Image (spheres, helix red, strand yellow):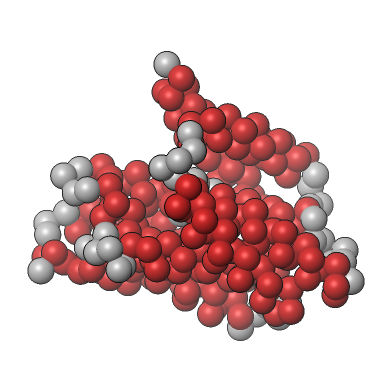
Amino acid sequence: MDFLIPELWLLLPLAFLAGLIDSAVGGGGLIQLPGIFTILPNQPAPVLHGTNKLSSFCGTAIATRQYARHVPFHWKMLAGAIVMAFVFANLGARLIPLLPIQYLRPIMLVLMIAMVIYTFYKKDLGHIHEPRFQQKGEIIAGLCLGAAIGFYDGFFGPGTGSLLAFAFVKFFGYDFLVATAHAKIINLTTNFAALSFFVPHGYLLWGVGLMMGASNIGGALVGTHVVTKHGAPLIRKILIAVLTLTIGKFGFDTLHAFM
């Protein structure tokens, strides 16, 4: 009966806020994962990771459904990207014990700083939907993006949704609303890939995860309503804010790792 724990009064609003932010442009994990580790410090790390993924999966699934009502998906491109994301997310997760993850943080920190500077100064970024690829080229680009982001999310993870949204805007020519919607599909896949590892091994608190998932769904419903109403300009501002938060976390973690 783990859903009766007193810490739920802290976990539920945390999950709601994470779902709201994650549905808008990704980055909910930056709030939810550190929070659940702080609130439940006596639980094993794999269990907390699994519980976090279950909550995130619930919110992302609802956000995807909500976006599907407003945005036409490019399914031919997404089909290959989904397969590659699933395969490489599993591969990334399996390589965690074998590769020194601390060396990835400085690389991602530089990348995030470049992204936020570019997005800040390019005021019209993501305002117009002008796909850059023909169908075949878009499919190939989707395969590459799915593989890269799947591996990143399986191996490391923070900021996956923001990275996806930026990639769809910058390289595919999507506007921010369409980019965010497509990012949710792939993010849902990588969450499912992670759960396919955590669930069979029993690495989650089902009651807590499902209660947090319900709260995460509430946040996702609010977030998708707001961004579909206000569109690309609002998403751009949220992306800058989330990337700035991500940079701060990466910077702190990088300094801490090398001290």
Number of marks drawn:
0
Where is residue 127? Give x, y as percent: 78, 60
Give the position of the N terminus as an image quadrant: bottom left
Q: Residue at x 57, y 53 (%)?
A: 151
User: Looking at the image, which is closer to me, 134 or 39?
Assistant: 134
In depth, the one of 234 and 179 nearer the eye is 179
84 or 126: nearer the viewer: 84
44 or 225: nearer the viewer = 44
- Give me the residue at 27% from left, 47% from top: 45
Q: Is residue 248 visible?
A: no
196 up-or-down from 160: above or below: below
Which quarter of the image is occupied by the C terminus? Answer: top left
Q: Residue furthest front?
A: 98
Image position, residue 118 (x, y; %): 75, 40
In the image: residue 6, left or right of residue 129: left
Q: Position of residue 123 (x, y in %)?
A: 79, 47
Residue most extreme to the bottom: 69
> Height in image: 237 above or below 72?
above
Residue shown at 72%/59% (left/top)?
Answer: 144
Query: From where the camera sits, is residue 45 visible?
Result: yes
